[in-house]
Amino acid sequence: MTVKTMKKKIAVICAVLLFIALTAVFLYCQNNLIETTYFSFSSQKLPESFDGFRIVHVSDLHNKSFGKENAVLLKKIENEKPDVIFITGDIVDSRHTDFDVSLSFAGQCVKIAPTYYVSGNHEHRFDNAEEMFEALKNIGVTVLENEKAEIRRGENKITLYGLSAKQEDGFLGDYSSQIKALCNEKDDSGFSVLLAHYPQYLSNYAQAGFDLVFSGHAHGGQFRIPFTNQGLFAPDQGFFPQYTGGEYIENDTVMILSRGLGNSLIPLRLFDRPQLICVTLKGE
């Protein structure tokens, strides 16, 4: 083998190793560097004292840790100085479950701001889901499983509704009956917010007249097409899903859909970094 041939082989090997290293760094960043996305929501129905009210939205953690005991994620949440934290399900994962990770994270959230939670489908894959809900309540989280709560500022209030992800009619069954049952308790006169894990029922949420909806579940479509808002695949929606992440409007209802933070069946994100959402409410 000539010296020239040897140098060419070494150059090829180095190029391949460099490509592998850069790919590894890229994939690590895609799955571990949290992107914070900001939204502003305005409504004439919003009480004056809630102008400037800040909401941090967390979804689909799936037991993932960003730093030791989720210190990186919690610091990002704290830096946003939220008035409340909303968690829209799947903080655990049925395939690699560690309840301690989820409970520790939720317990630290409570120390930052009042924290409200609705379940995701992964929580209901366990026989002891109710025990987990009780554990969350015991550490100060407000669990809303087909329930409502009032958030007050001075003399004013907004009403928060939480829709359970447990589908009584079976997996992928008719979910409209549960939505209807919750909506029977809805007060149409005030400003209403819905926490609901599944985004594909936006039409039902809009028909019920919710002002603002927070949702997750879609994981941003897992692999997103660069420079578009289109994901490749989402649970329950299949390929090229309609709802993957961002803001969606139907009638007078706005849905803020998180791309989520962790992974589940598909352990990789592409052009779909983990997402934390911050929403500021504004009066008109």
Image (tube, rainbow, N blue to C red):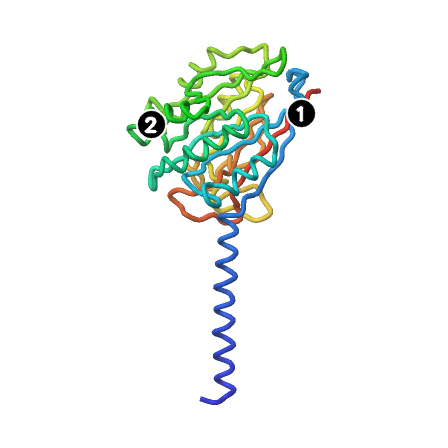
- Residue where numbered disc 1 is placed: 52
Q: Looking at the image, how many numbered discs can be counted on the residues?
A: 2
Amino acid on which the number 1 mark rests in the picture: Gly
Which SS class for mark 1? loop
- Residue where numbered disc 2 is placed: 129
Mark 1 Cα-neighbour bin, 10 Å: few <14, some 14–19, many ≥20: some
Vertical placement of residue 200 versus 207, above or below: below
CA distance for labels 2 and 1: 35 Å
Q: Quadrant of the N terminus?
A: bottom left
Amino acid on which the number 2 mark rests in the picture: Ala
Residue 55 locus on image (x, y percent): 58, 28
Residue 205 locus on image (x, y percent): 50, 21
Comes first in the chain, label 2 or label 1: 1
Residue 206 locus on image (x, y percent): 53, 21
Could you tell whether 96 is left or right of 280 in the image?
Answer: left
Vertical placement of residue 231 versus 49, above or below: below
Vertical placement of residue 179 versus 244, above or below: above
Question: Which residue is the extreme one toward the left?
Answer: 127
Residue 18 locus on image (x, y percent): 51, 67
State the residue at coordinates (34%, 29%).
Answer: 124
Vertical placement of residue 222 versus 137, above or below: below
Q: Quadrant of residue 189?
A: top right
State the residue at coordinates (50%, 73%).
Answer: 14
Mark 2 Cα-neighbour bin, 10 Å: few <14, some 14–19, many ≥20: some
Which SS class for mark 2? helix
